[in-house]
Image (tube, rainbow, N blue to C red):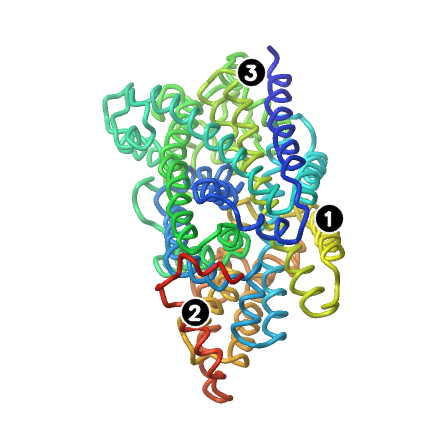
């Protein structure tokens, strides 16, 4: 069967499933729209949270960034998984015990301030909107390849699908849709990895194959990969080369940003009890581990496959010829992806060969010139976001596997986009309109305003997705930095410190997100408009600290400002102190939801 038809069948069937579930689980009340009626089983919620959390950045982009950088980009794995553990242990159970619908509502009540609630709403919208840009980037990449449409059309199709099941289903519909999406994405991610691991190492378990022997050479797989990439003039795959300070700050930014993501925190409001929230967090970690233990193997094995395809006889031989690329079916995937504009090559010196090497390495350039292959890398474009989606084609796997990966990539992007849009809509309708501007709004009116807010958010996110400030995972990293600098410190201080008052919380959030936003805009362009950046991440404003790593600095500023301002203003009222202490008391926590 034609690959295009297979893609349509798999993607169409999965979309029909998502929309059908949303119709079946349609939200009929604000409780169902915001928190799925607080009746979701911990295992089900764990699976839905896994899908909500493992976005296009995890599925589509992360392995690609690891593949082309190696050890230094393991920060994505360390930061995101460490952050989820932090969220599960330090925040989720206490926030669930507090019993509110949204993160902004918790901040408003804990800091006894409508201003604090509004600032939290703004911070939430800024971080979530930036995050959605990354998801829409992934949607455009996936649709552009597998439905053979341009990026703009792909974004519009994806936006329509999200609109159909998120706007009408609310949290209840999104929860059960995300369970289906998790099943699709995890199967789609692991099946190709199993095939490729077995091909390269003889071991069907990718995480074990990564540390096994390369079947063709008998050498350890990672040693073989190190040898190939260093022969091509690149840094060794398994060693540390990046700036250590920036690496630490980036990992920390991802970690505390994860713990401050409102769309993930909201998932813990959907379970019936605090005990269920703890179990839900544990199950989520299990479901996340299935993908995160596989991703390093996917990246390493794909890099090995690509390098060997570009140098069929090893780096001591000749580069791949244009004739071979056009005649050998195993190179068909390159021509297909070239049509999307995300992959390209050019025979710059007219020798009929495509030489792939690191042209920034002067010694390698001299060596290539002496061999007659020219001084420039001729694989001129390889978008990191295509790697996982192209992996089955690179390994020459069956057509149904390629179609399954297409459906999985879209499931990952759309599931997180839905969760983020729900967080944005609840902030607007529940916190801004119902909480402040129109407190007498009926439940029906609030539900309608939430849906309108989500529709508007979809339109804005789709527009911004047309011009992302980086690869999907890099854009998402910016969002994590914004959450780290604004939401996370307020939650931590709100739960674990009674010294922080309303003035301190507001000042801290404003200082944290303002400084971080300015630093990001200086490096990525004002409001991400191309050509407006004053600095580049290769030449940062502050030493070696890149824009994606600045969230940790913003968080430190938030904490410092909050404590200083709180110390200069009125102490926290006694009733709020008692409230905070009651939230942290474990006794009877399992039944804490009874009063809410």
**Does residue 210 appear left or right of residue 122 in this picture?**
left
Q: Label 1: state its secondary structure.
A: helix
Point out the tag, 2 or 3, that comes first from the N-terminus: 3
Which residue has dot 2 on it?
A: 495
Q: Is residue 132 visible?
A: yes
Q: Which residue is mark 3?
A: 326
Badges 2 and 3: C-beta atoms under 8 Å apart?
no
Reading the image, the residue beneath label 1 is 455
Q: Are marks 3 and 1 in contact (CB under 8 Å)?
A: no
Between label 2 and label 3, give the one nearer the viewer.
2
Residue 211, image quadrant = top left
Residue 491 is left or right of residue 177, and the answer is left
Q: Residue 104, how many percent across, how many down? A: 58, 65
In the rendered image, is residue 546 in sight?
no
Q: Secondary structure at mark 3?
A: helix
Report x, y in % for residue 588.
Answer: 38, 62
Q: Are marks 2 and 1 in contact (CB under 8 Å)?
A: no
The residue under the point 44% across, 21% down is 395
Q: CA distance from mark 3 to mark 1?
A: 45 Å
Q: Nearer the viewer, mark 2 or mark 1?
A: 2
Give the alpha-carbon distance from disc 2 to disc 1, as whole Å.
33 Å
* Of 45 and 138, the residue lying toward us: 45
Q: Earlier in the sequence, mark 3 or mark 1?
A: 3
């Amino acid at each position: 069967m034609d690959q295009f038809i297979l893609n349509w069948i798999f993607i169409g069937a999965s979309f029909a499933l998502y929309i059908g579930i949303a119709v079946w689980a349609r939200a009929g009340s604000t409780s169902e729209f915001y928190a799925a009626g607080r009746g979701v089983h911990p295992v089900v919620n764990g699976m839905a949270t896994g899908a909500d959390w493992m976005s296009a950045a995890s599925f589509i982009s992360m392995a690609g960034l690891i593949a082309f950088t190696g050890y230094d980009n393991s920060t994505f794995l360390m930061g995101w998984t460490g952050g989820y553990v932090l969220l599960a242990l330090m925040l989720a159970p206490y926030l669930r015990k507090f019993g509110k619908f949204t993160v902004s509502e918790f901040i408003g009540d804990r800091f006894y301030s409508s201003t604090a609630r509004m600032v939290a709403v703004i911070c939430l919208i800024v971080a979530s909107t930036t995050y959605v840009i990354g998801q829409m980037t992934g949607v455009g990449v996936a649709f552009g390849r597998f439905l053979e449409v341009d990026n703009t059309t792909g974004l519009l199709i994806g936006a329509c699908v999200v609109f159909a099941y998120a706007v009408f289903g609310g949290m209840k519909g999104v929860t059960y849709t995300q369970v289906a999406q998790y099943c699709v994405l995890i199967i789609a991610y692991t099946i190709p990895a199993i095939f490729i691991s077995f091909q390269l190492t003889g071991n069907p378990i990718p995480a074990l194959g990564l540390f096994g022997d390369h079947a063709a050479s008998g050498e350890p797989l990672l040693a073989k990969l190190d040898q190939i990439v260093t022969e091509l003039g690149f840094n060794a795959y398994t060693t540390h080369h990046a700036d250590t300070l920036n690496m630490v700050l980036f990992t920390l930014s991802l970690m505390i940003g994860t713990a401050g993501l409102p769309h993930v925190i909201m998932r813990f409001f959907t379970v019936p009890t605090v005990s269920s929230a703890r179990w839900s967090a544990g199950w989520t970690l299990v479901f996340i581990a299935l993908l995160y233990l596989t991703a390093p193997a996917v990246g390493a094995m794909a890099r090995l496959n690509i390098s060997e395809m570009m140098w069929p006889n090893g780096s001591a031989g000749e580069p791949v010829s244009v004739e071979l690329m056009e005649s050998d079916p195993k190179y068909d995937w390159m021509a297909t992806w070239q049509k999307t504009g995300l992959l390209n090559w050019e025979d710059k010196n007219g020798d009929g060969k495509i030489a792939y090497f690191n042209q920034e390495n002067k010694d390698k350039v001299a060596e290539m010139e002496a061999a007659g292959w020219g001084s420039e890398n001729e694989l001129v474009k390889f978008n990191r976001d295509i790697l996982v989606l192209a992996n089955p084609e690179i390994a020459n796997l069956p057509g149904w596997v390629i179609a399954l990966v297409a459906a999985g990539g879209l499931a990952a992007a759309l599931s997180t986009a839905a969760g983020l849009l729900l967080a944005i809509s609840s902030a607007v309708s529940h916190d801004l309109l119902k909480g402040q501007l129109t407190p007498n709004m009926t439940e029906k009116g609030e539900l309608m305003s939430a849906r309108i807010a989500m529709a508007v958010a979809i339109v804005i996110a789709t527009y911004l997705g047309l011009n992302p400030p980086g690869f999907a995972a890099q854009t998402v990293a910016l969002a994590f930095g914004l959450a780290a600098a604004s939401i996370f410190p307020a939650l931590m201080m709100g739960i674990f410190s009674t010294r922080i008052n309303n003035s301190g919380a507001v000042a801290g959030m404003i200082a944290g997100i303002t400084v971080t936003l300015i630093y990001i805009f200086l490096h990525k362009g004002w409001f991400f408009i191309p050509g407006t950046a004053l600095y580049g991440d290769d030449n940062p404003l502050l030493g070696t600290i890149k824009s994606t790593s600045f969230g940790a600095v913003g968080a430190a500023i938030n904490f410092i400002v909050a404590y200083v301002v709180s110390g200069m203003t009125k102490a926290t009222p006694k009733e709020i102190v008692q409230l905070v202490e009651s939230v942290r008391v474990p006794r009877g926590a399992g039944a804490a939801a009874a009063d809410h």
